[in-house]
Amino acid sequence: MATTLELEQETNPWRAAEARFDEAATRLNLDDGMRKILRAPSKEITVNIPVELDDRRVEVFTGYRVQHSIARGPAKGGIRFSPDVTLDEVRALASWMTWKCAVVNIPFGGAKGGVICDPSVMSDDELERLTRRYTAEIIAFLGPERDVPAPDMNTNERVMAWIMDTYSMHMRHTVTAVVTGKPVDLGGSRGRREATGRGCLTVTLEALKRFGWEPSGTRVVIQGLGNVGGTAARLMQAAGFKIIALVEVEGAVHNPNGLDVDAVIRHRRETGSILDFPEAGNLKRDEALCLPCEVLLPAATENVITSRNAAGLRCRILCEGANGPTTPVADEILADQGVFVIPDILANAGGVTVSYFEWVQDRQGFFWNEDLINERLSEIMVNSFTAVTDYAARHSVNNRTAAYMLALDRVAFAIKLRGLYA
């Protein structure tokens, strides 16, 4: 059993990002200079944001925006509002965005933002004032050709509309392409909300082909019923998968014969909890993650699978809908158990792929129908899954290492083609 100190080091997201980078860089034989360029973020912006609260008190919130790389195009990445935001977390997420965009071969670099706050205790007016002031503080670094934010934890279409409007007011003209994940009526893309969950479904179906399985005989456990997990659960059920357990912060519900996903979501909306759903039994979260199943899909936060529970997992396929749900130490345990991992920088790249489509549509001023968006998303996800698994076979590495190697190779190649400005 890992000590508390060891677990803290294991679950530091920046340390995890560094460890995976180092392994891929070593296998690629990257020279020291290129390692230094790719390892360090290009920019780290910290701002202190004064906001007048509804009771007229002034509070100062700390916000971050980290741009990891712009070698292949504008920086791209979400903004999260959470009391748990740290600079290390934002650094790691920004680097993962660089590798994610490279894995699916779209012309973006990586960025991430966050504000240390608790949205659950803030009014809509307070959140709007916070969002607009945060945007104003980092506005010199934003723009369709510079850095394009998107929603993330505790942010949504409305928050993106506030950012877009604030940026546009400063530019003195409407700039829809400065953010993605906007409302459709403000230049958002159809299919964006479902894109990450749909991408998880697509790569899982590709993995099933390798095992010779059909969805109807595939048991799935999903952790998280937010936009990613909830969408993936609905789409997987519609595709014939048997969703045997759903896991949330309050616990888990389990039915070996399969759950009605929409009914569970409706039950949670009505009661405030998924527990005590009439057609299922209650389980603790860790118990549900260790149920026998073909597919485990963590779709909530980082560090769900660690050295403490990895050995107990009984899934055959791990599809990472969340960013960084598995620690490097847990990776080694899963490899020893023969778990087929679809790493986060591939599995959940559907969201940034359709964000790219949204950015393209805004810049063209011409919008696509949802069938075309889903068709193009499927094509990119299938091609990227094949590229990663072929790379893994060719280099005798696991899928995560292959995904990182492929991404690093593409970004390093772009830097070499551009050269260093002096």
Image (tube, rainbow, N blue to C red):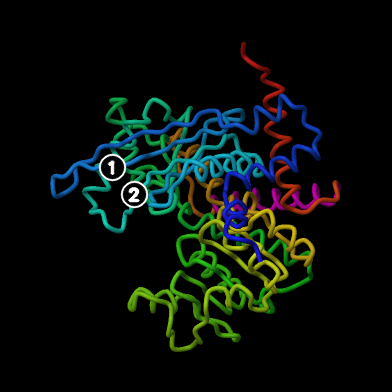
Residue 389 spot, x, y in % from top left: 77, 52
Residue 145 spot, x, y in % from top left: 48, 27
User: From the viewer's perspective, is 148 left or right of 323?
Assistant: left
Residue type for callout 2:
Cys
Q: Nearer the viewer, residue 234 or 79?
A: 79
Which residue lies at the image location 70% right of the left edge and 37% below the top edge? Answer: 408
Q: Which residue ends up furthest to the top in the rendered image?
A: 422
Number of marks: 2
Which residue lies at the image location 55% right of the left edge and 28% below the top edge? Answer: 42
- Is there a contact, CB below 8 Å, between mark 1 and mark 2? yes
Residue 37 spot, x, y in % from top left: 65, 27
Q: Nearer the viewer, residue 15 or 343?
A: 15
Magenta highlight range = 372-394
Residue 104 spot, x, y in % from top left: 65, 44
The residue labelled by disc 1 is 130
Q: Is residue 277 magenta?
A: no
Which residue lies at the image location 32% right of the left edge and 25% below the top edge? Answer: 171
For the residues marked 1 and 2, what is the alpha-carbon distance in whole angstroms? Answer: 9 Å
Instruction: Kindly identify which numbered label has been placed on residue 117.
Output: 2
The C terminus lies in quadrant = top right
Which residue lies at the image location 70% right of the left edge and 66% below the top edge? Answer: 317
Crowding near the residue tagged with mark 1, few <14, some 14–19, many ≥20 C-alpha atoms within 10 Å: many
Closer to viewer: mark 1 or mark 2: 2
The mark that comes first in sequence, 1 or 2, is 2
When the figure is inspected, residue 331 is found, relative to residue 64, above or below; the finding is: below
Magenta: main secondary structure equals helix
Q: Which element is circle 2 on?
A: loop
Residue type for callout 1:
Leu
